[in-house]
Amino acid sequence: MHSPLLTAVLKSCNSYADKTALVSGSQSVTYGQLKEMVFKAASFLKSEGLSKGDRIALSARKELDFVYLYFAAHLLGIENVVVDSESNAKKLDYMMGLTCPKALFGFAWKDVPSFSYENLDFSPLEASEPEEAVDKEDIADIIFTTGTTGTPKGVCLSHWNIYSSAMNINGFIGNSDSDVEVLGLPLCHSFGLGRLRCTLIAGGTIVLLGSYANIKQFFSALETYNATGFAMVPSVWAYIRKFSGTRIGKYAPQIKYIEIGSAAMPLESKQELCSLFPSTRICMHYGLTEASRAAFMEFHQNKDCLQTIGRPVSKEVDIKIMDESGNPLPKLQTGEICVSGNMVMRTYFRPEENAGAFWGTYFRTGDMGYEGEDCNLYLVSRIKEIINVGGKKVSPSEVEDAIISLGVEDCICVGVADPSGILGEVPKAYILKGSALSFEDIRKGLASELENYKIPAFFEWIDEIPKTASGKKQRLSLKQS
């Protein structure tokens, strides 16, 4: 028996064999070809000695071979470790050392067998359907997210989790086989990868766009393929708005849906989107990698309460506001947002990271919020010390540790408003006076320690690091409003 997701994808392949499933650059792949190539990729994995229960790591690049291998692993019961193609050496060392994959695709690490996407050729292989039985509760994907300690957490998602999430999303947004989506989001996170899954199980077409950096290319894709939808994070909207004004509004008649998520969006931006897309379903989700798309709201439906993060959109999902002891709180009382449902992760990869992560079956998000009288949920604050850089979460302690490793005695890192108005927040580091290193020395040294978005945009000297009596850094005392 296949995983439920693959069963749904193969149903699309059989129902729409001659229809375009994927577009990547000049390449166009029908559903019939998608099925064939996924089966051939499965044959390749088997020929390399990989089987159910093994683990492979995939660099999440917008390559057709990535898509084929991703689904082929699901067919065989092989776990996918999905890796950001921009991960630095230190993060790769941690993720690979922890998960111990038997093969790598799209990158190399130590002496583990690796394959470049450019040199893969599945075409000569047999395209027979694998016979392996996959249980829906088996782990399908491991996606790493950064926790409050700065150590990446491996989120283990079952086949049932990722299928259920896609069904929940499609049920709310209303995706169908008539949809053509331009996908500019990265595939290494649950948002972008989820959009790929959602469109293919609905029988729609996905146009793989490198990124949103080239706005002309994005607009061209919308026009060329008569796209009916796209997904973005709020920082992408700020970028589009800043460099192209309101020109995107001319595509409003053809755009059926827009999905937004990963970070908060200013009220003014929501109102402007409503004005530019008067007939489009503009859907914004709330969730984490651990509990993907737990709640949804739709801008036009919620025009009088655009500040809400919505409510669960499936009877399989429940959200409670809980106090510090795990007791449910009544409406209007602020507590921790906790989520239970068919898309909530099975476990963290490291068992010790599960301690305190759940109240029973309810995942503790670490976000504070309340339920309004209108039964909608309202977010009061995210985990206060995490820096949200355009939807990417940055742990201040990770940045601090990297700076101290360069030879700085001590420092403290907080999030400040991005002056460009695009990313929402950017990191700022306060360096204890007396360091022999200049700010430029530190910036250069961090280039090999951190991803670019984690490197502080601003530095400032500080006479004393604010700390509690027990020695914990008081980052919030330096947080700028």
Image (cartoon, grey):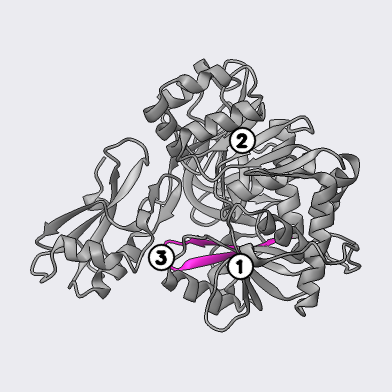
The secondary structure that most of the magenta stretch takes on is strand
Secondary structure found at label 3? loop
Q: Residues within 10 Å of mark 2 (few under 14, many from 20)?
A: many
The reply to whether discs 3 and 2 touch (Cβ–Cβ < 8 Å) is no
Q: Is residue 285 above or below residue 401?
A: above
Residue at 47% from the left image edge and 48% from the top image edge: 367
Q: Where is residue 285 drawn, in percent x and y?
A: 58, 38
Is residue 176 a member of the stretch shown in magenta? no
Which is closer to the viewer, label 1 or label 3? Answer: 1
Residue 453, position as x, y percentages in the image: 37, 54
On the rendered structure, is 412 left or right of 345? left
Residue linked to disc 2: 296
Residue bounds of the magenta highlight: 143-158
- Determine the image quadrant of residue 311: top right
The residues bearing labels 3 and 2 have C-alpha atoms spaced at a distance of 28 Å
The numbered mark at residue 150 is: 3
Q: Residue at x 79, y 68 (%)?
A: 77
Q: Is residue 156 magenta?
A: yes
Q: In which quadrant is the N terminus drawn?
A: bottom right
In which quadrant will I find the C terminus? top left
The answer to which image quadrant residue 228 occupies is top right
Q: Name the residue type under label 1.
A: Ser
- Name the residue located 69 percent from the left edge and 32 percent from the top edge: 173
Residue bearing the label numbered 1: 116
Residue drawn at (43%, 72%) of the image: 89
| Amino acid type of the residue tagged 2 in the rendering | Phe
In the structure shown, which secondary structural element does the residue marked by tag 1 occupy? loop
